[in-house]
Amino acid sequence: MRVFYAALTVFLFFSRFRAEVNDRYYPRYHLAPPRGWMNDPNGFCQFKNEYHLFYQHNPDSSLAPGSIHWGHAKSNDLFHWEHLPIAMDPDQDYDRSGVFSGSAIVENETMYLFYTGHVNHPGQSPDHEEHQCLATSTDGITVTKYPNNPVLIGAEHQPDIRDPKVWKHLDTYYMVLGNSFNNTTLGRVLLYTSKDKITWNEVSIIDESDGYLGYMWECPDFFELDGHFILLFSPQGVKPEGDKYRNLYQTGYIVGDFDYSTNTFKPMAKFQELDHGHDFYATQTVIDDLGRRIVIAWFDMWDQNYPEQLDGFNGQMTIPRVLSLSKEGRIIQKPVREIKAIRGETIHIGKSAGGTTIPLDDNAAEISIIARSSNGLDLYIESQNSSKSRVHIKYDSQNGTISLDRGGNDGLRRTVWQPQRNLKIKIYIDASSIEMFCGKGEVTISSRFFPNGPVQVRLGEKSAVKQIRVTKLNRTVFVNKK
Ligand SMILES: *[C@@H]1O[C@H](CO)[C@@H](O)[C@H](O)[C@H]1NC(C)=O
Ligand SMILES: *[C@@H]1O[C@H](CO)[C@@H](O)[C@H](O)[C@H]1NC(C)=O
Ligand SMILES: *[C@@H]1O[C@H](CO)[C@@H](O)[C@H](O)[C@H]1NC(C)=O
Ligand SMILES: *[C@@H]1O[C@H](CO)[C@@H](O)[C@H](O)[C@H]1NC(C)=O
Ligand SMILES: *[C@@H]1O[C@H](CO)[C@@H](O)[C@H](O)[C@H]1NC(C)=O
Ligand SMILES: *[C@@H]1O[C@H](CO)[C@@H](O)[C@H](O)[C@H]1NC(C)=O
């Protein structure tokens, strides 16, 4: 028995390092793990003038999260990412089944990382528990877990209480946590405060599900945006309703007002999805030195089993997007302006007739379209040699909807969009992904797709446009560099 396991361990050790990541679906300018598995973004912060992003990571397999670690990368411009050593392993009693999601604040030249220590108890009821923990880094590479972890037990809220997001207001630290209550049938967000980042007191419930919004709220984030407060979170267990909530789990927000003197949140509007594509989950935001509220999401979804898993990696992050709030109470998202610096040559520009076909270089491009909205639009992003792998983007001018259909089972995602006289759409294509920003960014659709070989963009036969510009985007992420 022992010999068998020793042999298996040796085999796994070598297979881990032997495994070459196949490049065909590996992103050119979105952050992905150097190998293995990636899910939620964690600890998004700016430290000594660089952006740092941690993420849920299994270095040993691209097939499953396993006992999750914190992977780590940094960047000057949110596009050129450098992989750093794994920041945290599940190596303590209190986090032995997983170093789960969390966030960072930077103070006194120190990164304070808050995360959830996940511990499984197979065969028991409940079969897991979760406690909040602290770790620090002063060099931005080496992370040290706080010796007296966990800092927050939350015994009365077990077993699902996780994903701490921490911020400071005046002289107080605030933490929101996702929780499941009523015997794990309803989701909510709890608020805690602390004067020292160590001792935390529960002060209020920010908001909770009445059943309609599911049984668990993951990855809560809470911040001020253009005069109001946003509760951004990822509810699980929301039922599909027409074109809404079609993914296994959702990510969206509630706009409202918050009173720091009573710690109460007053919602002004209903829950709205932040993105309408297949692959957008577990968002995290940071406010940077320039005062921008930047969001990043896991550009994937649970239970998808995409073909990249067999290529030695799974998962990537979306383009970082700057948030603002419209007068109508809708979040507007725009790619961070640093994206301009990765533009390569423009492959095609001008007024174009229906049927125009533009082959891409390296399956990575920015496509900008301006068209008369009354005409509608059909656009195909497809393999050059096979009509089987095709994504159909459609603006339906009669119904006022924008859709993306990637084919296959559950291929369609669609939402209402009311553009001005002109349709203005920006689409980012990257090896195995499509991120679409409509109008000023009031609607986004983010979905993965897995083409056979080189890709082209084609206007539908009836879709003449005022302008289509296709610009190459340069490679900024690499598989096994560092
Ligand atoms: C700031 O950091 C230094 C060095 O890491 C530490 O000695 C000091 O106690 C810290 N000060 C505060 C207020 O946390
Ligand atoms: C709480 O759960 C019970 C079942 O355990 C259910 O009957 C009840 O409706 C739930 N409460 C709410 C507010 O949904
Ligand atoms: C909680 O739910 C489980 C099954 O979902 C049930 O067995 C248990 O009796 C419930 N507990 C309470 C206190 O309702
Ligand atoms: C993009 O790549 C091309 C060649 O591949 C290079 O000439 C150009 O300088 C690059 N642009 C940027 C902004 O890095
Ligand atoms: C508008 O939507 C309806 C219902 O989904 C559909 O039957 C109809 O074909 C759509 N109109 C157009 C022009 O596609
Ligand atoms: C064309 O597509 C097939 C799969 O449909 C693929 O095996 C082949 O490599 C592709 N050829 C080129 C030139 O990309």
Image: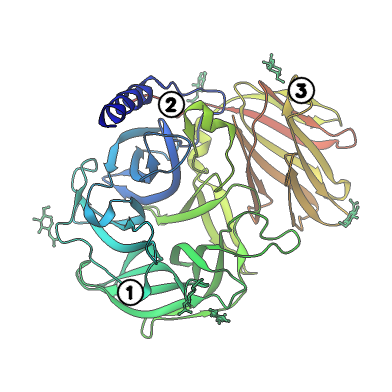
SS at mark 2 in the image = loop
What is the secondary structure assignment of the residue under circle 1?
A: strand
Q: Nearer the viewer, residue 97 or 57?
A: 97
Ligand 1 located in image quadrant: bottom left
Where does label 1 land, which residue?
192
Q: Secondary structure at mark 3?
A: loop
Q: Quadrant of residue 360?
A: top right
Instruction: Indicate which disc, 3 or 2, sits on the residue closer to the N terminus.
Output: 3
Residue type (three-letter) at the residue carrying disc 1? Tyr
Q: Residue at x 55, y 65 (%)?
A: 253
Which disc, if any, is residue 233?
Answer: none
Residue type, mark 3 in image: Ser
Q: Position of residue 225 (x, y in %)?
A: 49, 66
Q: Nearer the viewer, residue 163 or 371?
A: 163
Gap in angstroms between the C-alphas marked 2 and 1: 40 Å
N-terminal of the pair, mark 2 or mark 1, is 1
Does the rendering let one see residue 176? yes
Front label number (3 vs 2): 3
Which residue type carries mark 2? Phe
Residue that sits furthest to the bottom in the current view: 262
* Residue 305 percent across, percent down from the top left: 57, 39
Q: What residue would you read off at disc 2?
A: 478
Q: Which class describes the residues within 10 Å of circle 3: few (<14), some (14-19), or many (20+)?
A: few
Image quadrant in which the N terminus is located: top left
Is residue 150 or residue 349 the one in the foreground? 150
Instruction: Measure the C-alpha gap from mark 3 to mark 2.
Output: 27 Å
Q: Residue furthest front?
A: 1
- Of labels 1 and 3, earlier in sequence is 1
Residue at numbered disc 3: 386
Residue 386 locus on image (x, y percent): 76, 22
In this orientation, which residue lies closer to the viewer: 124 or 36?
124
